[in-house]
C-alpha cells in the first residue's frame, strides 16, 4: 500500500527527470558537432589519384576534433561527479523522514548531467559514462524505496575507475 506522499513524490521525480532529460537534449542541439567541421573542410577529389590524399586529410582533421570533444566530455563529467557528490552529501544531511527523496532526486539529476555531457565523446568514454549513469540511477531507485536505505556505492566507484581509464586512454 502506497502512502499519498510517496505517490506524489514519484510523480514529482518523474516530471523533474523528464524536464532534465528534455533540457539535456535541447542543450545538446546547441553544441557544434565535430562531424560538421570535417565535412565542411573535406575537398571533393578532382581525380582518382587525389582521393587517398583527401581521405587521409579528412581523417587527420576529424581525429583531433573527436579527441577535443572527448577531452571536454571527460573534464565535464569529472566535474559533474564531484559536484554531484557535494550535492548528495548536502541532501543526506536532511535526514529522515523525507531526506531520502532529496538524495534520490539528486542521484537522478546527476545521472542526467553525465548523460548530457557524454554526447560527442568517443565510444569508450561514452560506454563508461553510461555505466556511471546506470549506477547513479540504481542508487536513486534504492534511496527512493526506503528512508533507511544505505546502498553500496562499490559498483559506482568501479564504473568511475573504468571511466577514468577510458579518459586517460583518449
Image: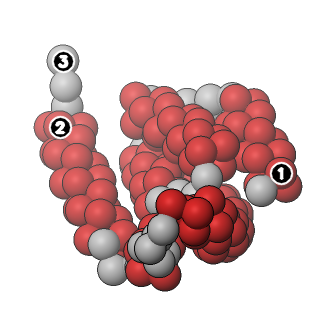
Sequence-first tag of 1 and 2: 2
Q: Secondary structure at mark 1?
A: helix
User: What residue is pinned by disc 2?
Assistant: 7
- Give the residue drawn at x 40%, y 29%: 145
SS type, badge 2: helix
**For mark 2, does the 10 Å Cα neighbourhood hold few (<14), some (14 to 19), or many (20 or more) residues?**
few
Query: Residue 104 in the image: x percent, y percent?
Result: 45, 46
53 on left or right of 16: right
Q: Earlier in the sequence, mark 2 or mark 3?
A: 3
Residue placed under numbered mark 1 in the picture: 169
Residue extending farthest to the top is 1
* Label 3 packing within 10 angstroms: few (<14), some (14-19), many (20+): few
Residues at marks 2 and 3, CA–CA distance in whole angstroms: 10 Å
Q: For residue 43, say whether it is visible.
A: yes
Q: CA distance from mark 1 to mark 2?
A: 44 Å
Q: Nearer the viewer, mark 1 or mark 2?
A: 1
Residue closer to the observer: 154 or 99: 154
The residue to which callout 3 is attached is: 1
> Residue 100, how many percent across, how many down?
47, 45
Quadrant position of the N terminus in the picture:
top left
Q: In the image, what residue occupies the spot 51% across and 61% down?
A: 48
Cα–Cα span, label 1 and label 3? 50 Å
Q: Position of residue 84 (x, y in %)?
A: 60, 62
Q: For numbered disc 3, what is the local secondary structure? A: loop
Amino acid at each position: 500500500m502506497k502512502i499519498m506522499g510517496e505517490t506524489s513524490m514519484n510523480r514529482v521525480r518523474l516530471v523533474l527527470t523528464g524536464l532534465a532529460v528534455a533540457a539535456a537534449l535541447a542543450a545538446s542541439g546547441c553544441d557544434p558537432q565535430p562531424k560538421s567541421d570535417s565535412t565542411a573542410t573535406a575537398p571533393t577529389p578532382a581525380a582518382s589519384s587525389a582521393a587517398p590524399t583527401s581521405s587521409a586529410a579528412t581523417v587527420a582533421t576529424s581525429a583531433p576534433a573527436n579527441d577535443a570533444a572527448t577531452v571536454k566530455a571527460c573534464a565535464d563529467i569529472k566535474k559533474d561527479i564531484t559536484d554531484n557528490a557535494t550535492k548528495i552529501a548536502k541532501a543526506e544531511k536532511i535526514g529522515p523522514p523525507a531526506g531520502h527523496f532529496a538524495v534520490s532526486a539528486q542521484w537522478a539529476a546527476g545521472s542526467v548531467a553525465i548523460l548530457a555531457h557524454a554526447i560527442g565523446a568517443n565510444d569508450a568514454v561514452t560506454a563508461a559514462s553510461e555505466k556511471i549513469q546506470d549506477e547513479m540511477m540504481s542508487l536513486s531507485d534504492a534511496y527512493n524505496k526506503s528512508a533507511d536505505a544505505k546502498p553500496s556505492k562499490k559498483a559506482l566507484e568501479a564504473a568511475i575507475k573504468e571511466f577514468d581509464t577510458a579518459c586517460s586512454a583518449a
